C-alpha cells in the first residue's frame, strides 16, 4: 500500500505526540497539531502533516522556541501587539485574538502585529476566526528571501502570502490565501519529494534561466505570480509585516537563519474590519449586495476561493486524511 489513511483524531494525536516527544510544550504542540491536521483535512498538503518534518527540524536546529509564552500588549486603541518570543506564531495569535476582535468591534478596524514568531502555517487558518466573528480579515507575512523581484534574478522577497476573508451568513466565508510567489515553496519541495518536474514559470535556476527542475529552482530563485504585479504585492508584504511592525524582511530572516535551514522568522500583520461598525443599521443591506456579487461570479461558472477547502473538510470529517506511506514513516520516525 502506497498510502496511509488516518482518522482526523489519529492525525492530530500522531502530530501532537511527535511534537511533545521532540520537546514542544503541550500548549505549542496542541496548537501546531491542530493546525497541520486542519491543513491536511482542508486539502492543503503543502501546509499539512508534511510540515511536521520542517517544524521538528527547525527545533532541532535551535531556530524556534519550544515553549515561549507570548506577551500580549494593548498598544493603542486599535492596535494589539503579540510578542511570540521566538516560538511559532500560533499560540501568540490564539492569545491575542480576543483583544483584536474586541478592538475591531469597538473601533470598526483594528490591527494585530505578531512579532518574533517563526512561521510555517497557512494564513487561511488565521482568517477563519475573524470571519466566524462576522469580521472582514486580512493577513500577511514575509518569509525567507527565496523569490526574485520582477526584472531580477536573485532571491530577495519571501513567498509572502496574503489572505483575505469576508464573512457570509449561513455559508462558508469567502477566503483566499495565496503566496505572492507563483507557488508556495512547500509545493516545490513536495514536487521534489515526488520526483516530479514543476510547471514552467515557478522559478529560475542559479544562472537565472527558467527551469522546471525543483532542486534547481530551490537553489536558484522562485518567481512572483503575474510578473511585476505579484512583485509589487510581495514588496508590500515585506513593508507591512516588516518595517511597519518593527520586524524582519525576508532577506533579514534568511540572514538570521545563517544557513541553518530553519523556517522563516519575523512578523505577521493581521487586520480586522467590522461591517456592522462601518454600516450600522444598513449592514445587512450591503452584506446582501456582497452575496449578489458572489452569486454573479458563480453564475458564470467561477469557483469561489475556499470552496474546495470546505468540500475537502466535509469529506475528510468521515473519511480521514490520506498521506503517502513514505511520509507517514518519516513522521513516525520522529517519535
Ligand atoms: O511554503 O511558501 C512556503 C513557506 C513559507 C514559509 C514557510 N514555508
Image (cartoon, rainbow, N blue to C red):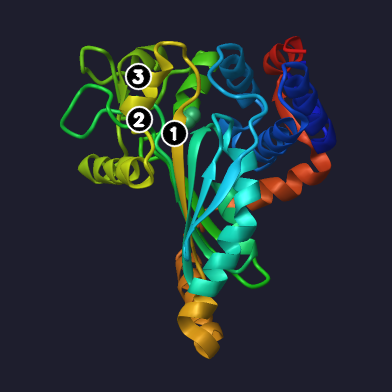
Q: Is residue 296 left or right of residue 94?
A: left
Q: CA distance from mark 3 to mark 1?
A: 12 Å
Q: Residues within 10 Å of mark 1 (few under 14, many from 20)?
A: many
Q: CA distance from mark 2 to mark 3?
A: 9 Å
Q: Residues within 10 Å of mark 2 (few under 14, many from 20)?
A: many
Q: Is residue 156 left or right of residue 144?
A: left
Q: Which residue is mark 2?
A: 250
Query: Residue 89, how many percent across, how many down?
Result: 57, 38
> What is the residue that sits farthest to the left in this orientation?
151
Residue 308 vs residue 16, the one in the foreground = 16
Q: Do the CB atoms of the residues marked 3 and 1 lie less than 8 Å apart?
A: no
Q: Is residue 306 left or right of residue 146?
A: right
Query: Residue 111, how many percent across, how many down?
Result: 46, 57
Q: Which residue is mark 3?
A: 255
User: Which one is in front in this view, the residue at disc 2 or the one at disc 1?
Assistant: 1
User: What is the secondary structure assignment of the residue under circle 2?
Assistant: helix
Q: Is residue 173 visible?
A: no
Q: Is residue 115 above or below residue 324?
A: below
Q: Where's the N terminus, which quadrant?
A: top right
Amino acid at each position: 500500500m502506497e498510502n496511509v489513511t488516518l482518522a482526523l483524531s489519529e492525525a492530530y494525536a500522531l502530530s501532537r505526540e511527535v511534537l511533545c516527544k521532540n520537546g514542544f510544550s503541550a500548549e505549542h504542540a496542541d496548537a501546531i497539531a491542530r493546525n497541520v491536521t486542519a491543513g491536511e483535512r482542508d486539502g492543503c498538503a503543502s501546509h499539512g502533516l508534511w510540515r511536521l518534518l520542517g517544524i521538528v527540524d527547525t527545533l532541532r536546529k535551535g531556530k524556534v522556541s519550544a515553549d515561549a509564552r507570548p506577551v500580549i500588549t494593548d498598544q493603542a486603541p486599535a492596535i494589539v501587539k503579540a510578542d511570540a518570543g521566538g516560538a511559532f506564531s500560533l499560540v501568540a495569535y490564539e492569545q491575542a485574538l480576543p483583544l483584536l476582535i474586541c478592538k475591531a468591534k469597538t473601533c470598526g478596524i483594528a490591527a494585530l502585529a505578531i512579532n518574533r514568531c517563526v512561521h510555517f502555517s497557512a494564513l487561511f487558518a488565521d482568517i477563519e476566526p475573524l470571519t466566524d466573528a462576522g469580521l472582514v480579515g486580512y493577513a500577511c507575512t514575509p518569509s525567507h528571501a527565496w523569490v526574485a523581484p520582477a526584472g531580477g534574478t536573485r532571491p530577495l522577497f519571501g513567498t509572502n502570502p496574503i489572505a483575505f476573508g469576508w464573512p457570509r451568513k449561513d455559508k462558508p466565508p469567502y477566503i483566499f490565501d495565496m503566496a505572492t510567489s507563483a507557488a508556495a515553496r512547500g509545493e516545490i519541495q513536495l514536487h521534489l519529494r515526488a520526483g516530479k518536474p514543476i510547471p514552467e514559470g515557478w522559478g529560475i535556476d542559479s544562472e537565472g534561466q527558467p527551469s522546471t527542475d525543483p532542486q534547481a529552482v530551490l537553489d536558484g530563485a522562485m518567481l512572483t505570480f503575474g510578473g511585476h504585479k505579484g512583485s509589487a504585492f510581495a514588496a508590500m508584504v515585506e513593508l507591512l509585516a516588516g518595517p511597519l511592525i518593527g520586524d524582519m524582511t525576508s532577506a533579514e530572516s534568511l540572514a538570521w537563519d545563517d544557513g541553518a535551514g530553519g523556517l522563516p522568522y519575523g512578523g505577521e500583520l493581521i487586520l480586522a474590519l467590522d461591517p456592522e461598525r462601518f454600516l450600522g443599521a444598513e449592514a445587512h443591506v450591503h452584506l446582501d449586495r456582497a452575496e449578489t456579487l458572489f452569486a454573479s461570479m458563480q453564475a458564470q461558472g467561477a469557483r469561489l476561493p475556499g470552496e474546495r477547502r470546505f468540500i475537502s473538510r466535509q469529506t475528510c470529517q468521515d473519511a480521514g486524511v490520506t498521506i503517502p506511506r513514505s511520509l507517514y514513516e518519516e513522521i513516525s520516525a520522529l517519535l
